[in-house]
Image (tube, rainbow, N blue to C red):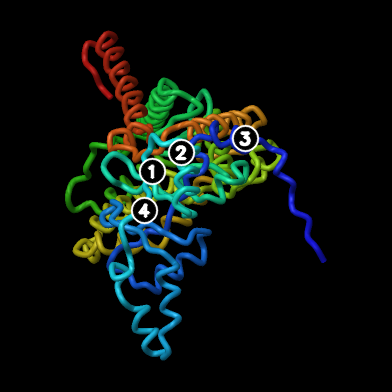
Amino acid sequence: MRTELPNRLSMSASLELSNLPLRAVLRPAPVLSPEDTVARFVQATRFVAANELPVVESGRLVGVASLADAVELLAIPGDEDREIALRRPLSSLMRPAEAVARTGSSSAEIGKLCAQRGINAVPVVDEDGYCLGIVRAVDLLLPEAPVCKPGLVGGMATPFGVYLTNGSLQAGAGNLALVASGALMGLLILLTIKCLSMGMWAVHICSHLPYYPVFDVEYDPPAGHPMLGIATVAARVVVFAVFLLLLKMTRVAGYHGAEHQTVHALERGEPLTMDVVRRMPRAHPRCGTNLLAAGVIFFSLDRAFGYLPVLNQAEPVLAALATLVTWRQVGAFLQERFTTRPATDRQIQSGIDAATELLEKYRQSEPSRPRLFRRIWCMGLLQTMVGSVLLVGAVILVEWIVSGQPNI
């Protein structure tokens, strides 16, 4: 039976190719080093539609390996000798790249290289010789076929929408929204500590029991009072729980869920539509909630074990083991129950808009390696820290004006 292929010949291929951004056809290449075996290179060609693959050293292009050269090993008569040849280092097979494209090259220029040299893949390098990937001739012949998307996407929830980044590009909510998110987190923490401290003081007044500032983060119980120490650790876990409850009541929790669902859809290559994104899971393995859970588990157990005479010599080891066993499960539980909640249509649309913007920026951007500071900035942590510092500074200023002495 003859299979009918889509008729694409009616398209103006030259027109589409001339307008096609390099990012749209740039594909990641298997990381092959000169010390790898020839067999590993042959195995890599099974999964990449290219007969030539770049060979890199410390990320920089040092040559290419061709499947045509590896096929010649089939002429070796003995299976054992052929196996020995396949175990040789790839450096024995590689040769200098016949054609190399730069980040400023156009898709049309790379297409001409492929046609003139008769090659089906061209490595792309930046100004430092760092290999960013390959462009395949088949993707240039059918330019509408490649799916152009960032390899890894992260994000944050803000009070004003979803923020997404791939480490070099930013989309969705802006930097001021990230600052506002940090200010909100700082406000929730201060409210939690203040309310619990006032509640503890009220219990002290009404019951005439001794007052212990267990909710004060700087409070350290006196030696010889293990139960008071355990109570202090428990109180800080309560602070954490109350903070999570307050967080869940804010709109940020909904945007947080929408952010995770959008990232899941992006990573799976799913359509960015309301019905598809909505059925994605709200928990994500790379969420910062997991790291927060790990920190709370480790430091709480380490502190609690330190108050117990039987365990106070091995508390870091025991706390670390308990953290390694439980932190992912606890993090996923916290995401599902506290740090996210079912998103509204408006919140999911915010995630879809941010993802669409990121994909378009990625498609139109010139291929490059994000620098360290750019990565840190795009993570959004600096902006949220600024927001928290500004909030704390404002509280100190208000207390200074009201009482003449700041007291946080």
Q: Nearer the viewer, residue 398 or 80?
A: 80
Residue 325 is left or right of residue 61, and the answer is right
Cα–Cα gap, marks 4 and 3: 52 Å
Question: Does residue 194 appear in this view?
Answer: no
As drawn, the label of residue 5 is none
Q: Residue 29 in the image: x percent, y percent?
A: 43, 55
What amino acid is found at the position of numbered circle 2 in the picture? Glu
Q: Residue 56 in the image: x percent, y percent?
A: 31, 56
Q: Residue 33 in the image: x percent, y percent?
A: 31, 62
As drawn, the label of residue 343 is 3
Which is nearer the N-term, disc 3 or disc 1?
1
Which residue has dot 4 on it?
Answer: 98
What amino acid is found at the position of numbered circle 4 in the picture? Glu
Dot 1 alpha-carbon crowd within 10 angstroms: few under 14, some 14 to 19, many 20 or more: some
Q: Are marks 4 and 1 in contact (CB under 8 Å)?
A: no
Q: Are marks 2 and 1 in contact (CB under 8 Å)?
A: yes
Dot 4 alpha-carbon crowd within 10 angstroms: few under 14, some 14 to 19, many 20 or more: few
- Mark 2 vs mark 1, foreground winner is 2
Q: Nearer the viewer, residue 208 or 267?
A: 267
What amino acid is found at the position of numbered circle 1 in the picture? Ala
Dot 2 alpha-carbon crowd within 10 angstroms: few under 14, some 14 to 19, many 20 or more: few
As drawn, the label of residue 109 is 2
What amino acid is found at the position of numbered circle 3 in the picture? Ala
Which residue has dot 1 on it?
Answer: 101
Q: Residue at x 50, y 43 (%)?
A: 111
- Mark 3 vs mark 1, foreground winner is 1
- Compared with 145, 206 (above or below) is above
Cα–Cα gap, marks 2 and 1: 9 Å
Pick out the residue farthest to the right: 1
Q: Nearer the viewer, residue 296 or 192?
A: 296
